[in-house]
Amino acid sequence: MAKKNRSAPNKGLRGSKVGLALSLGSSALAVIRASKQVRRAKGSHDKLNTADAVAGMLPLITSAALILRQLRGRRQENPETA
């Protein structure tokens, strides 16, 4: 049995334009929701709740940054489609 070419891994839904747009949209909505939570926590002057809300935002921001980097990499690979 021959080995399969593993140089191009299967990206699934995130590999498509629609999948990337959905991922970016859901990350953006999650960041908006988390920022509202931070504002509410700051309004109640509860430092522990504020710290929890800020810590919850960090993975969301990282996820959005990774998706944006993936979009930029796609655009550089296919300059004729941009």
Image (spheres, rainbow, N blue to C red):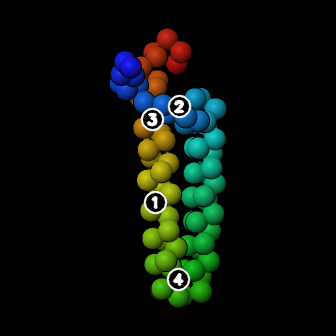
Residue 48 can be seen, yes or no? yes
Q: Circle 3 sits on which residue?
A: 70
Vertical relation: 32 (above or below) 6: below
Kindly identify the amino acid type of the residue bearing the numbered disc 1.
Pro
> Which dot marks residue 49?
4
Q: Which residue is drawn at 42% across and 30% down?
A: 9
Q: How far apart are marks 2 and 3 (CA)?
A: 9 Å
Percent coordinates x, y for residue 20 in the rendering: 57, 36
Q: Mark 1 or mark 4, which has the lower sequence index?
A: 4
Q: Which of marks 2 and 3 is nearer the N terminus?
A: 2
Q: What residue would you read off at disc 1? A: 59
Residue at figure coordinates x 59%, y 44% from the top left:
23
Q: Which of the two residues, 72 or 4, is positioned nearer the viewer here?
A: 4
| Labels 1 and 4 touching (C-beta < 8 A) | no
Q: Distance between the residues labelled 1 and 2?
A: 21 Å
**Mark 1 or mark 2, whichever is nearer to me:** 2
Answer few, some or many: residues within 10 Å of disc 2's Cα (few below 14, many 20 plus, some between 14 and 19): some
Q: Residue at x 47, y 39 (%)?
A: 68
Q: Is mark 3 on a helix, strand or loop?
A: helix
For the residues carrying marks 2 and 3, which lies nearer the camera in this image? 2
Look at mark 2 in the image and give the residue it sits on: 15
Name the residue type under label 3: Gln
User: Can you give x and y, in whole percent of width and height, for residue 47 in the image?
Assistant: 47, 86
Between discs 1 and 2, the one toward the N terminus: 2
Mark 2–mark 3 CB contact (< 8 Å) = no
Q: What is the distance, in whole Å, between disc 1 and disc 4 at their CAs? A: 17 Å
Percent of width and height locating residue 39: 58, 73
At numbered mark 2, what does the secondary structure look like: helix, strand or loop? Answer: helix
